[in-house]
Amino acid sequence: MRYLTEDIGKQILRKTGLPVPNGFRAETPQAAADAAEQLGGQAVVKALVPTGRRGKANAVRLTDTPAEARKAAEDLLDATINGHLCKAVYVEERVDIASELYLSFILEDYPPRILASTEGGVEIETVHQNRPEAIITATIDPLKGLPVWDAINIWERAGLPSAQLPAVAKVTAALQTVFERNKGIMLELNPLVIDSNGRVSLVGAMMAIEDDTMAEVNEDTPRTDREMREDRVRKVSRELPGGMVRYTELDGNIGMFVGGGGAGLHQHDLILAAGGRPANHTDASTQNPDKVRELIDVILDNPQVKSLFISWHYQQMAQIDKRVIPALEALTARGIDAREFPVVIRMFGQGEEAARSAAAAIPGVHYLPHGAPMTDGIDLIVRLTAKARSQTQMEV
Amino acid sequence: MAIMIDKSTRVLVQGLTGRQAQVDSANCLSYGAQIVAGVTPGKGGQEVLGLPIYNSVRGATLRHDIDASVIYVPAAGAASAALEALHAGVRLVLITSEGISRHEMARVVATAASRGASVVGPNTNGIIVPGQTKLGGIGGKDPADIYAAGRIGICSRSGGMSAEIGLSLKSGGYGVSTGIAMGGDRVTGGRMVDYVRLFEEDPQTDAIVIYGEPGSENEMDLARHLHENGVRKPILALIAGLFQENYPTGMSFGHAAAMISSAEDSASAKRRLLAQAGAIIVDSISDLPHLLQQAGISPTQNVEELT
């Protein structure tokens, strides 16, 4: 899933002919002042960060002159807003607001849903809490989409006056098409404004879309060692062929090469329950040896790591030697002695013989017997890591 | 008897000319599955694994009786392949493909519902009826090493965990009536509660093991079902991902998700709801045999010699 910043989201809406206020992206205070000038002086300056609740974070400023827009941009640029570094602002035309509606489309679990309310604005969640009936929820039949007449029914139920129904319903139906075409996970219009002339304007617009590619890294942001290791994995996952690899670094000391989603999750839970502390979490589907080597190298590059745990579910479709052998290669390439640095492997499936003989050639590597329970691997790695740690402490 | 499929199920493989499809299908055939034909547009008239290839599903259904289709088409064309099978009248469609658009999947789910057909997956590694048949990669080359035949139903959001559950059951002397890897995507054809309902009706299933995790409402729906209809057979729930709650989450984006979610989408919330509804919560996969014993289910495994 990818969150779009407001400028990109609104560009998508504008291209389909939807009524979006004029606005410009600005990366410097001067550009913000110029944009305000072009909009006639009055403007709204908003931090371009992919997060909601910007109003409450004081990241949306009403400005009356280009000089004020410049000042607002100076404040917001390089500030951290809800955890995101602000590298650009959005300078938008001021719309005079007669009423604020709330509208969203969401596709989490099936089916897709639409939420609509005549009480839009920053307090929508409070409205939902206190008077849930003020927000109309309806499902959308994917085979039918959302025809205008369905949109009229929804807004009528929400209490929108008859005179406003045609214009709002037309925009609502068009928005549903945009949501579907762009593979939206969420599209939220808050507020969807009706101005003093009765015209609809999409003032607040946020969109998250389906996206299989990893989130792009902002190269300008200074990276910590941990983030650089995470970046390395993201890079190989994207650039090399043959399945994905994911790596999230944590604060523990057990280097984890677990894969296949569910088995990785359960083993992580079991390690914590047994008193161990993972140094990272991984998920992977790759059999590309280059990808595996790089991932293992990153795991071992973390100075906190005191052991390596290679344990997937019983492999039914993949060749396990294509994962175990490159992992062991990465280990030996770093000159690691498995007699002092615990390495525990629990890998079963096709290619197991080749994997076992590669492991047997490295003194100290523990390869669990075929069919050994998952918990045996957990117990062993937690026990050996604790022992290795106490030995290191004694040496120090 | 099993649920969904049995040894008489006649199977079509869409994308049979691809590498993974051939590996899996060869394994299925040697396990006893009745794969009768394949489909790859543009390759009609060829033969793969001794099976005829057709250009379309309709082309295959004109010449063969097809009960189920397994799809190995890459993500971009997988939803279309599933729609083709459904419109050709196939009653059961398994989608193994990974990375299908949620919106495209929504259309597949709606189409299946309108035709009274079933869709398993996407991102499923298959269904197995140990000792009889299997569809998809489930069990791999030597399914008997993982799954013994028996009377426990498995429904797993993860294909890997389905295998580990099979292995843990086998070590305790238990076998499996049907094992279903339902797929881990947010939008799937069959939902967890659908499979549990089938297991509840199946006279050959004594107890049900489910594997769930954060990332969908499947487990909440199941808890609601158990709460409303009562527990008819012991149901053991292994929910992973507790550790994620120890780490910080991302900032929320927008309000819509917060307003439609009925409960917190976390492993601990799912465990709590399922426990309240009468499910037995499994902390560790190795506890399965012991918990089944405690629930009064005796190990009846019958490991059939396969030919």
Image (spheres, coloured by chain):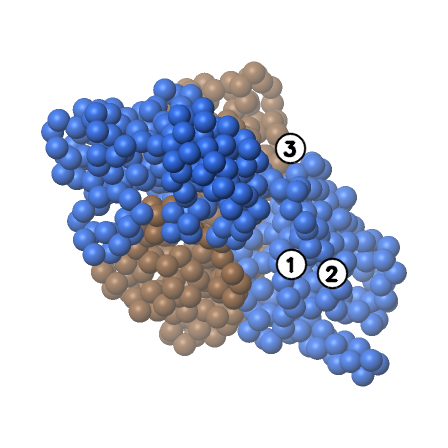
Of the pair A299 and A369, the residue shown nearer to us: A299
Q: Is there one chain holding both mark 2 and mark 3?
A: no
Tell me how far mark 2 sits from mark 3, CA to CA. 37 Å
The chain drawn brown is chain what? B
Amino acid type, callout 2:
Asn
Q: Mark 1 points at which residue?
A: A249
Whole-number angstrom distance, CA of label 1 to CA of label 3? 35 Å
Q: Which residue is drawn at 13% across and 26% down?
A: A163
Give the residue number, with chain letter if any, for mark 2.
A302
Question: Which shade of the palette goes to chain A?
Answer: blue
Decide: marks 1, 3 in contact (CB < 8 A)? no
> Badge 1, how many Cα within 10 Å: few under 14, some, many 20+?
some
Tell me the quarter of the image containing the C terminus of chain A.
bottom right
**Front position among marks 2 and 3:** 2
Q: Residue B19 carries which label?
A: 3
- Callout 2 touching callout 1 (CB < 8 Å): yes
Residue with the most extreme left position: A162
Amino acid type shown at disc 1 = Glu
* Pointer 2 or 1: first along the chain: 1
